[in-house]
Amino acid sequence: MTNLHAHGEVPVTDGELVAEASAQVAGAVSLDALAVVEGELLGRKSPLAARQKTLGALDPDARREAGQELQAVRGQIEALVAARRAVLEETAYAERLAADRLDLTEVLEGDPPWRGHLHLVQRTRDELEDVFAGMGFAVAEGPEVETDWYNFEALNMPPAHPARGMWDTLYLNLGEPETVVLRTHTSPVQIRLMQSQAPPVYAVMPGRCYRRDTPDARHIPTFNQIEGLVVDRGISFADLAGTIETFTTAYFGAGIHSRLRPSYFPFTEPSAEYEITCTICGGAGCRTCSHTGWIELGGCGMVDPAVFAAVGLDDETWSGFAFGFGIDRCAQMRHEIPDMRVLLENDVRLLRQI
Ligand code: DAH
């Protein structure tokens, strides 16, 4: 190896410099200590920097050669530091893991020990699926990240359609701006289903949805819906009303009924709001139902011809109905939960009860 210091003041060879650096790096037992050593070896006051300064006095050819050698030495020292840092970081991580370990055995208190159970929302979803399966419906699912086309356009909401304002959409930074969304409802699964299977369709589609909502007692920004879709020959609004009423009494009990009130959704015509007898007061009127005796669960209606057109189905041959309502809202109504936010908080004192 060349002695760089034939012309300079610092009397060490490359080899000595790297060996010395290697010993110092190995001696650093913590990330902080390594940072100090790194400064000493590579910083402005290091022997390396001192040598760098001597380069100016050399003639151009010698300077280039000496400069390259110096760079090589710097590279070797940097590699030593990086390797040591990786080792120390791993050790620090392992130590942190050991220190942060949570003792979860606490939840096994009790005799017999409490082993936990499915979350209320999951149980509600399972029960809803069971009721609809009993009525002859299949269960289908779709993605939570959707394109604008599935979430809006195919559902008869072209770009800039004012009805889009009914949903406070969360867009993802993917592709062209505002083309990929966290689905605001389960309705896009209707479209996927009609694309993937020929009628007749009798299906429910449960799943998580997202809206840019401020949480309050009856709204959470991450929530669950169950969508329903029937497509067959000769389906009428009476079929829709009958299905909704059958479901309501089957799920909530004999004293609870449904009513449909005229409403608007772009993907159904006519459209209705789906309400059930308030479970808190049994229909007599109370604060929860604003003294109406009814609680809104979701929306429904007859599939709009524009939706059939989007998936290439002939609306002369086929007719159908659809509905969509909140699973969390169902759980809230059936279990009389005053504030929906508790469903997301995972407070173990609550989870034990529900
Ligand atoms: N997607 C609607 C919402 O989230 C609910 C809905 C209304 C679903 C009418 C439907 C329907 O299938 O026909 O507000």
Image: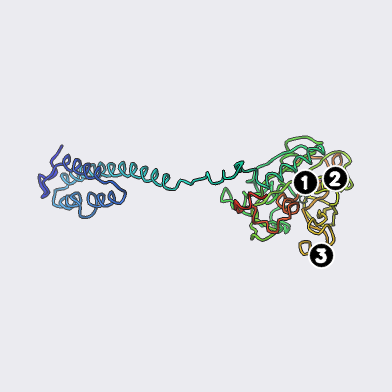
Q: Position of residue 31 (x, y in %)?
A: 31, 49
How far apart in space, not on screen, are marks 1 and 3 (Cα)?
37 Å
Mark 1 or 3: in front is 3
Secondary structure beneath label 2 = helix
Give the mark, 1 or 2, whose residue is nearer the N terminus.
Answer: 2
Does residue 219 lie above or below 204 as drawn?
below
Taking depth in this image into account, of 20 and 89 the one nearest to the observer is: 89
Asked whether disc 1 touches disc 3, contact meaning CB atoms under 8 Å apart, the reply is no
How far apart in space, not on screen, are marks 1 and 2 (Cα)?
26 Å
Asked whether disc 1 touches disc 2, contact meaning CB atoms under 8 Å apart, the reply is no
Confirm whether residue 152 shows in the render. Answer: no
Does residue 218 lie above or below 11 as drawn?
below
Mark 1 or 2: in front is 2
Q: Read off the residue under disc 2.
A: 246
Secondary structure beneath label 3 = loop
Q: Residue at x 22, y 49 (%)?
A: 41
**What is the quadrant of residue 64 in the picture?**
top left
Q: What amino acid type is highlighted by mark number 3? A: His
Q: Position of residue 48 (x, y in %)?
A: 19, 49
**What is the quadrant of residue 77 in the picture?**
top left
Give the mark, 3 or 2, whose residue is nearer the N terminus.
Answer: 2
- Label 1: few (<14), some or many (≥20) within 10 Å? many
What's the colour scheme? rainbow
Q: Position of residue 232 (x, y in %)?
A: 84, 38
Q: Read off the residue under disc 1.
A: 307
Disc assigned to residue 291: 3
Identify the image quadrant of the N terminus: top left
